[in-house]
């Protein structure tokens, strides 16, 4: 099996990003971001169609209520629909019972909209971490087949630095789950988060490509999970009132993102996350097991 690259998209309006938590956003600006989110997502859909690629879209559940046609069109185009929580709160803001309610509300709204099961999850801001290990039990309980929320990096906002870099079985307090971690590049004893975000906007695609090539030289199954957001492809959107590092991190390099995505999509073979999950199961790999919860 060659490296299976996955183009995943976290579908949320721009004002929901973690850096904007606590900012007062006017209803007019919310409405504008909602409309721009739909336009940018449709541009991404067109680009994927032009290159004959199917992706995985982790969508905020509320968007199934506000933009049902967008969600149906993504599904009809052959893309996988996954959950990105109900309203984009980090897992840290929940207890197991309230997280379960949030997950089921999101899953149900998306399933009602597309008429098909939702089996994949990505937590807002990759917030499945050691302190939220109980989320694995809840995900398994709610019928999810895989998670893609554990970033094996050291970062100020997210990450589980010593988690495996390839697909693994994440062991929670009581249940376990197949995990597809976002792509990293191993260099000088560190894992660089090259899967998306600032790395994608700041550097030429050479870092992502290097990550995918490094993965190809590693043990099977070789999977390269990339992630993007619609607002990263909308350079003319109104700016949020962010300051300093946060502002720079959010808006750096946005002019050339569509061109870079197009180039990247040409260079590797892309699959939907669910198809990768099925291929891994069918091949019967003994995946590494990683206990997220404290023993
Ligand atoms: Zn998100």
Image: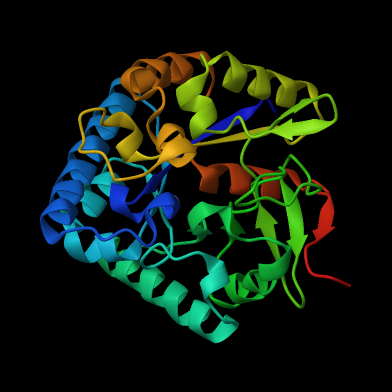
- In the displayed structure, 6 sits above or below 173; it is above
Residue 216 at x, y percent in the picture: 72, 23
Say whether residue 250 is left or right of residue 176. Answer: left
Q: Is residue 33 left or right of residue 78?
A: left
* Towards the viewer: 247 or 137: 247
User: Which sits in the foreground, 109 or 39?
Assistant: 39
Tell me if residue 14 comes above or below residue 259 in the rendering: below
Residue located at (58% from left, 13% from top): 206
Taking the view exactly as shown, the residue that stands out farthest to the left is 28
Q: Position of residue 242 (x, y in %)?
A: 36, 44
Q: Residue at x 21, y 35 (%)?
A: 237
* Furthest residue in direction bottom, as rendered: 97
Q: Split into 4 quadrants, where in the image is the C terminus?
A: bottom right
Against 155, is 135 above or below? below
The residue under the point 84% across, 70% down is 294
Quarter-of-image position of residue 78: top left
Task: Say whether residue 176 is visible.
Answer: yes
The image quadrant of residue 165 is top right
Q: In terms of depth relative to the viewer, which is nearer, 25 or 110?
A: 25
Please provide percent x and percent y for residue 22. 37, 62
Report x, y in % for residue 37. Answer: 23, 44
Q: Is residue 143 visible?
A: no
């Amino acid at each position: 099996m060659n490296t299976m690259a996955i183009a995943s998209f976290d579908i949320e309006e721009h004002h929901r990003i973690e850096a904007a938590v606590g900012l007062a956003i006017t209803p007019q600006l919310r409405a504008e971001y909602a409309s721009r989110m739909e336009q940018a997502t449709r541009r991404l859909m067109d680009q994927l169609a032009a290159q004959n690629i199917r992706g995985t879209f982790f969508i905020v559940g509320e968007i199934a209520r506000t933009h049902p046609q967008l969600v149906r069109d993504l599904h009809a185009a052959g893309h996988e629909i996954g959950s990105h929580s109900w309203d984009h709160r980090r897992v840290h803001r929940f207890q197991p019972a309230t997280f379960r309610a949030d997950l089921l509300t999101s899953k149900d709204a998306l399933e009602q909209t597309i008429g098909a099961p939702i089996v994949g999850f990505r937590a807002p801001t990759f917030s499945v971490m050691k302190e939220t290990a109980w989320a694995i039990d809840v995900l398994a309980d709610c019928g999810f087949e895989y998670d893609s929320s554990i970033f094996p990096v050291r970062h100020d906002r997210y990450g589980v630095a010593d988690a495996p870099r390839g697909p693994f079985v994440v062991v929670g307090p009581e249940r376990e789950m197949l995990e597809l971690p976002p792509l990293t590049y191993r260099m000088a004893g560190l894992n660089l988060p090259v899967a998306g975000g600032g790395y994608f906007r700041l550097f030429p695609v050479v870092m992502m490509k290097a990550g995918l090539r490094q993965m190809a030289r590693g043990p099977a199954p070789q999977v390269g999970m990339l992630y993007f957001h619609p607002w990263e492809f909308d350079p003319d959107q109104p700016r949020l009132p962010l300051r300093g590092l946060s502002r720079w991190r959010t808006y750096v390099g946005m002019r050339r993102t569509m061109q870079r995505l197009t180039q990247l999509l040409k260079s590797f073979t892309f699959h939907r996350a669910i198809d990768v999950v099925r291929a891994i199961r069918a091949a019967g790999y003994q995946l590494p097991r990683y206990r997220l919860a404290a023993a």
